Image (cartoon, rainbow, N blue to C red):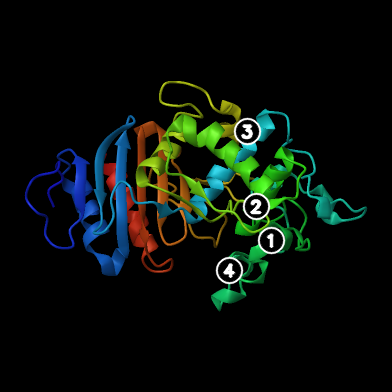
Amino acid sequence: MTLGGCSNAAPPEGAPRVLAGEALGGTAADAIERLFADSEAMGETRALLVLKDGEVVYEAYGPGYGPQSKLISWSMAKSITSVLVGFLVSDGRLALDEPAPVPAWQRPGDPRGSITLRHLLHMSSGLEHLETGDPAWEADTVEMLFGEGSADMAGMAEAKPAAAQPNEVYNYSSATSVILSDIVARSLTDSEIPAVRRDAVRNLLLGRLASPLGMTSLTPEFDAAGTMVGGSIMHATARDYAKFGEFLRRRGQTADGTRLIPESWVDFMLTPSPADGGYGGHIWLNRPRPAGVGDALWPGRGPRDIFACLGHQGQFIIVSPSQRLTVVRLGISRDADQIPNVREALRELMAAL
């Protein structure tokens, strides 16, 4: 596979459309070749974008997709939700280590009353949430997103009982991120009118994050109660997802050095949580995880400072500060047997650069 700029020659049918690139060879070329061509092992790669020092060194799209294609974030949205919480903590509207302001948890004697934002961001609230199930529709996440809980996702999530003490166990949960989205909305407005809640959160997201970064395609989704689906469903182009990765690589600053969020919040996001060292404040870290739990990245086989926003079906924003790299891969891959192959190919690509 030749990794060069655009040419007038038509690519072979089914080949990715390369928009930018320098002469990458060897392991990098092999990894990219597999990501696009080996659909049996990798699934479908729809977009691949590589930035070095903020400059695009490779950009390609699968057939039918291009730089204007908005693609779903799935759980990469969680890291964006964390940044929104960070804005409100830095503004003094929320506090990281005070009880989370969820009305349903404030009754005297309710054990959920001791849950803090830190616990929620670390996925260690102790709430009884089931992220995946067998069959899939028995999972809380499916019921919340697509079943009877979809009209008021936060209401369903916040009604779950405590199954453990806060900070006792790690339990990855998209419902937890929806609780955070509800807290964000409640901190911005006292209104229960869905349109008011929706507009308040959208204005925060666009005004404080997306617009300053030039993420013009970023489109969040909301439920009927006006709560942002902050754990699962946002849409953006590959280029705009890369801008978010670069924002975190620059530790909360824009490309021109304008600070959008305190560096201390980025430090919090990138600090391992007590219950799972491979997870930070709603973001994945290249650190060992507890025994018996699969690695999310490549601890011991890549720079320790690598972190990533990861989403269902193989959505990746991977940032390596020490390598000055940001890599975005978007597509559809099966969790069990294809995503490990995608992850390994991305590791090889980044190691080669």
Asked which secondary structure carries label 3, the reply is helix
Looking at the picture, how far across and down is residue 110, in whole percent? 87, 56
Residue 58's spot in the image, x, y percent?
Answer: 24, 42
Q: CA distance from mark 1 to mark 3?
A: 24 Å
Residue, x 65% and y 52% (percent of image)? 227
Residue type at the position of mark 3: Phe
Compare marks 3 and 4 and give the one earlier in the sequence. 3
Q: Nearer the viewer, residue 305 or 148?
A: 148
**Horizontal relation, residue 304 to residue 143: left or right:** left
Q: Nearer the viewer, residue 266 or 238?
A: 238
Q: Write down the residue under mark 3.
A: 87
Which comes sooner in the sequence, label 2 or label 1? 1
Front residue of 283 and 79: 79
Amino acid identity at mark 1: Asp
Disc number for residue 12: none
**Number of residues whose C-alpha sits closer than 10 Å to that of mark 2, classed few (under 14), some (14–19) or many (20 or more):** many
How far apart, in angstroms, are the residues tagged by discs 3 and 4? 29 Å
Residue located farthest toward the top when viewing the structure as drawn: 257
**Dot 4: few (<14), some (14–19), or many (≥20) neighbours within 10 Å?**
few
C-alpha gap between disc 2 and disc 3: 17 Å
Q: Evaluate whether residue 221 shows in this view.
A: yes
- Asked if the residues shown at circle 4 and circle 2 are in contact, with their CB atoms under 8 angstroms apart, the answer is no
* Residue ID for mark 4: 146
- Would residue 274 appear left or right of 163 to someone viewing this image? left
Q: Residues under labels 2 and 1: Cα distance?
A: 8 Å
Q: Secondary structure at mark 2?
A: loop
